[in-house]
Image (spheres, rainbow, N blue to C red):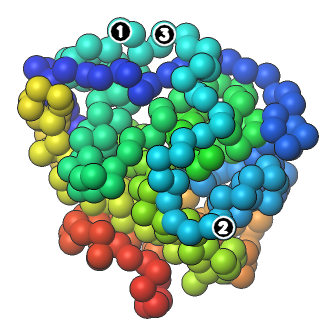
């Protein structure tokens, strides 16, 4: 994965909250408790997640009812007022993205913004932001710690990422791959949850566990959306019409597929529990996650990514 040195980067939606300590959040400080977590040997805290139903049940926020999408109503939690360390101020062009991981993150966000803006046209609204943090952070869904992993919060329409997840959890604990496009896949997956929020897919979640549950269908659709973006990434442009990516290789796609497999429910359960229990799946198996990423990559359409159309996933 290489970026066009002439491409200009837009850091306007990027923020770094710095290091936070766990404290009281919304809903009595319950935040985003995920059953088991890393230390407890459960599966939740080490998955790429939106875990809609957990947010709804544990933070006291009703995000599943009342039709689809968020419309233009915005959020009561204003992430634009969140403290910003200025981490991304250094990121100006594609050359910076080729040399610096933080700026690479900006370039991927810019590419996702351009792709989905073109794909959805007037239906598109960008996320409020992409916020990186370490330790803990306060969100529109409550307080979250690094154990949660990367996630999208529907009430504040923001993607949150503790960048240590990739080395400490995905690679070291789950045996996932290391490489630049791994994080790009994760960001594309979480951005996919924002697209679902806009299009109303989140309101379709009724069943919450099992390989054919609505929760799994939601996650697999986000993987498919990530594949859609990867298919078109080299055609995405900055605000001046310069292409953002100069190259995206078969090796990059292989890394994305390996990452998708590493966070499959069956792989995580095998590593953390020593056994696989399909009835508790919330994100899908390694095979399911890879397959739906490839559907998006090969077919590249919203219709192909409709995991709620009645077929088995």
Residue placed furthest toward the front:
73
Q: For mark 1, give the secondary structure.
A: helix
Give the tally of numbered discs. Answer: 3
The answer to whether residue 279 is above or below residue 112 is below
Residue 226's x, y, as percent? 35, 56
x 71%, y 81%: residue:
279
- For mark 2, what is the residue? 65
Q: Viewer-proximal residue, 128 or 39?
A: 128
User: Residue 11 location in percent, x, y?
Assistant: 36, 21
How many neighbours does mark 2 have within 10 angstroms: few (below 14), some (14-19), or many (20 or more)? few
Residue 180 relative to residue 130: left or right: left
Judging by the rendered image, the residue that carries numbered circle 1 is 90
Task: Classify 137 as above or below 204.
Answer: above
| x 54%, y 23%: residue | 80
Distance between the alpha carbons at the discs numbered 3 and 2? 37 Å
Disc 3 is placed on an element classified as loop
Check disc 2 and report its element: helix, strand or loop.
loop
The circle on residue 86 is: 3
Q: Which mark, by number, is residue 211?
A: none
């Amino acid at each position: 994965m290489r970026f066009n040195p002439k491409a200009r980067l837009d850091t306007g939606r990027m923020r770094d909250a710095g290091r936070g300590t766990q404290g009281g959040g919304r809903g009595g400080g319950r935040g985003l408790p995920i059953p088991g977590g890393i230390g407890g040997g459960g599966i939740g805290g080490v998955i790429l997640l939106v875990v809609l139903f957990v947010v709804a049940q544990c933070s006291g926020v009703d995000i599943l009812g009342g039709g689809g999408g968020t419309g233009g109503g915005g959020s009561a939690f204003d992430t634009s007022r969140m403290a910003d360390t200025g981490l991304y101020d250094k990121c100006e062009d594609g050359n910076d993205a080729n040399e610096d991981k933080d700026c690479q993150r900006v370039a991927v966000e810019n590419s996702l913004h351009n792709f989905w803006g073109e794909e959805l046209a007037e239906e598109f609204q960008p996320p409020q932001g992409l916020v990186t943090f370490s330790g803990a952070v306060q969100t529109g869904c409550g307080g979250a710690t690094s154990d949660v992993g990367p996630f999208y919060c529907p009430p504040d329409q923001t993607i949150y990422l503790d960048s240590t997840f990739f080395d400490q959890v995905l690679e070291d604990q789950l045996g996932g791959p290391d490489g630049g496009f791994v994080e790009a896949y994760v960001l594309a997956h979480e951005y996919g949850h924002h697209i679902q929020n806009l299009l109303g897919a989140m309101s379709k979640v009724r069943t919450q566990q099992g390989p054919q549950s609505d929760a799994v269908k939601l996650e697999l659709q986000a993987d498919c959306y990530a594949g859609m973006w990867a298919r078109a990434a080299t055609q995405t442009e900055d605000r001046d019409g310069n292409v953002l990516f100069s190259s995206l290789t078969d090796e990059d796609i292989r890394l994305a597929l390996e990452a998708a497999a590493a966070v499959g429910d069956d792989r995580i359960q095998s590593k953390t529990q020593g056994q696989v229990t399909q009835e508790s799946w919330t994100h899908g198996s390694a095979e399911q996650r890879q397959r739906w990423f490839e559907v998006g990559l090969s077919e590249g359409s919203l219709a192909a990514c409709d995991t709620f159309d009645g077929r088995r996933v």
